[in-house]
Image (cartoon, grey):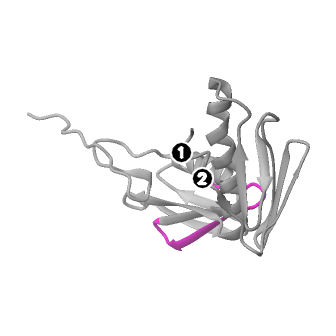
């Protein structure tokens, strides 16, 4: 039995859950998310909990069991608390700012790099060297954070670039005479 799949998902009172024809819709205080889940998985809504069950013990069903439960749990967490990724900018003169909804990065290029956020994603810059990507969909937040990081990934010699908060960058020694 999947350890992740058999765990029940707590359903807060502020969240409205609907399962219809292999489509899960979760509506909460922060917004609404819709996700198609595999038809084979049985989604049962109890009193204050959601349980995902699998029809058989085949390898395909076992692999989908934990996945389906994780997707639904992330949707419930997203519409109640939301998700965020923090990025740090390291380098002399490197900084970030917000222009309207867009994020403007000055990271050593001859021009500022402007990133428009997709729907349900917002940028914050509590400091010039910190960017916070917030949203209700975990996958989209991660993709946008990876896109921001890819503009100037951290380099191994001086450590300059954009990195995730708490990310360790393996440093190299460089040339020695």
The circle on residue 7 is: 2
Nearest the eye: 173 or 34: 34
Q: Quadrant of the N terminus?
A: top right
Q: Quadrant of the C terminus?
A: top left
C-beta proximity under 8 Å, tags 1 and 2: yes
Q: Residues within 10 Å of mark 1 (few under 14, many from 20)?
A: few
Name the quadrant containing residue 93.
Answer: bottom left
Query: Is 127 included in the stretch rendered in magenta?
Result: yes
How far is mark 1 from mark 2, CA to CA? Answer: 7 Å
Where in the figure is residue 49, as x and y percent of width and height?
71, 62
Residue at position x 68%, y 50% in the image: 140
Q: Name above or below for residue 176 compared with residue 9.
A: above
Q: Name above or below for residue 118 compared with residue 61.
A: below
Name the quadrant containing residue 68.
Answer: top right
70 left or right of 19? Answer: left
Residue at position x 48%, y 54% in the image: 107
Where in the figure is residue 8, as x and y percent of width and height?
64, 56
93 left or right of 169? Answer: right
Residue for badge 1: 3
């Amino acid at each position: 039995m999947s350890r992740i799949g058999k765990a029940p998902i707590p359903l807060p009172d502020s969240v409205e859950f609907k399962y219809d024809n292999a489509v899960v819709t979760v509506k909460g205080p922060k917004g609404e998310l819709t996700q198609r889940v595999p038809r084979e998985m049985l989604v049962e809504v109890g009193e204050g909990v959601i349980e995902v069950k699998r029809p058989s013990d085949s390898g395909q069903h076992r692999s989908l069991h934990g996945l389906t439960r994780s997707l639904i749990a992330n949707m419930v967490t997203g519409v109640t608390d939301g998700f965020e990724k923090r990025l740090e900018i390291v380098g002399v003169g490197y900084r970030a700012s917000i222009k309207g909804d867009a994020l403007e990065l000055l990271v050593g290029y001859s021009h500022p790099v402007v990133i428009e956020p997709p729907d349900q994603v917002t940028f914050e810059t509590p400091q010039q060297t910190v960017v916070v990507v917030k949203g209700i969909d975990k996958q989209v937040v991660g993709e946008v954070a990876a896109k921001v990081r890819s503009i100037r990934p951290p380099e191994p010699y001086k450590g300059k670039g954009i990195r995730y908060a708490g990310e360790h960058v393996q440093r190299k020694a460089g040339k020695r005479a």
